[in-house]
Image (spheres, helix red, strand yellow):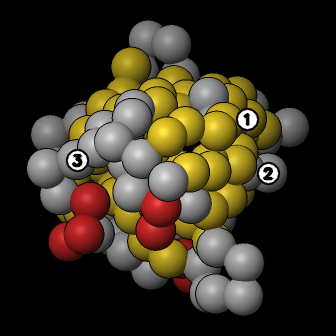
Amino acid sequence: QVQLVESGGGLVQAGGSLRLSCAASGYSFSSYAMGWFRQAPGLEREFVVAISGSGRTTDYLESVKGRFTVSRDNAKNTVYLQMSSLKQEDTALYYCAARKIYDGVSKYAADYFYWGQGTQVTVSS
């Protein structure tokens, strides 16, 4: 049974940092590209970042470049999202997702097959 479990969300002041984790199980983690998406209340789900199965290729939403860093540890079946200089507009439910392709990255939610339940990130002023 495939599972993606996000953790690390919480309440943080603007300018602060959080590190999200997504632990995967039930499939060959290293063979899948991973993505992080987010959804704020009343808005559509938004691409944040993607990372290839090898970790060598990444793609970021423009507004998070320089503030967010994605990484993965294939030995631990985990992908991470280090978020720094957080802004109120980063407040959202953050999801990780898996795409059955090794070396590509995609910003389209429809390309991802497995999804986690999300972890809430709230940035206060």
Q: Nearer the viewer, mark 3 or mark 1?
A: 3
| Residue 67 numbered tag | 3
Amino acid type for the residue under numbered disc 3: Arg
Helix, strand or loop at label 1? It is strand
| SS of the residue under disc 2 | loop
Q: The residue under label 1 is which amino acid type?
A: Val
The answer to which of marks 2 and 3 sits earlier in the sequence is 3
Vertical placement of residue 114 versus 73, above or below = below
In the image, residue 42 above or below residue 13: below
Rounded to the nearest angstrom, the CA distance separating label 2 from label 1 is: 7 Å
- Image quadrant assignment for residue 27: top right
Q: Which mark is residue 55?
A: none
Q: Residue furthest front?
A: 125
Q: Nearer the viewer, residue 29 or 63?
A: 63
Determine whether 55 is above or below 118 in the image. above
Left or right position of 97 against 119: left
> Which amino acid does the dot numbered 2 rest on?
Gln
Residue drawn at the location 39% of the way across and 35% of the way down: 16
Q: Which badge, 3 or 1, is on the more N-terminal residue?
A: 1
Q: Residue at x 72, y 88 (%)?
A: 42
Residue under numbered circle 1: 5
Badge 1 crowding class, 10 Å Cα cut-off, few under 14, some 14 to 19, many 20 or more, is some
Left or right, 82 with respect to 7, comes to left
Q: Quadrant of the N terminus?
A: top right
State the mark number for residue 117. Answer: 2
Is the residue under label 1 in contact with that under label 2 (CB below 8 Å)? yes
The residues tagged by marks 2 and 3 sit, at their Cα atoms, a distance apart of 24 Å
The x, y position of residue 20, in whole percent, is: 52, 33
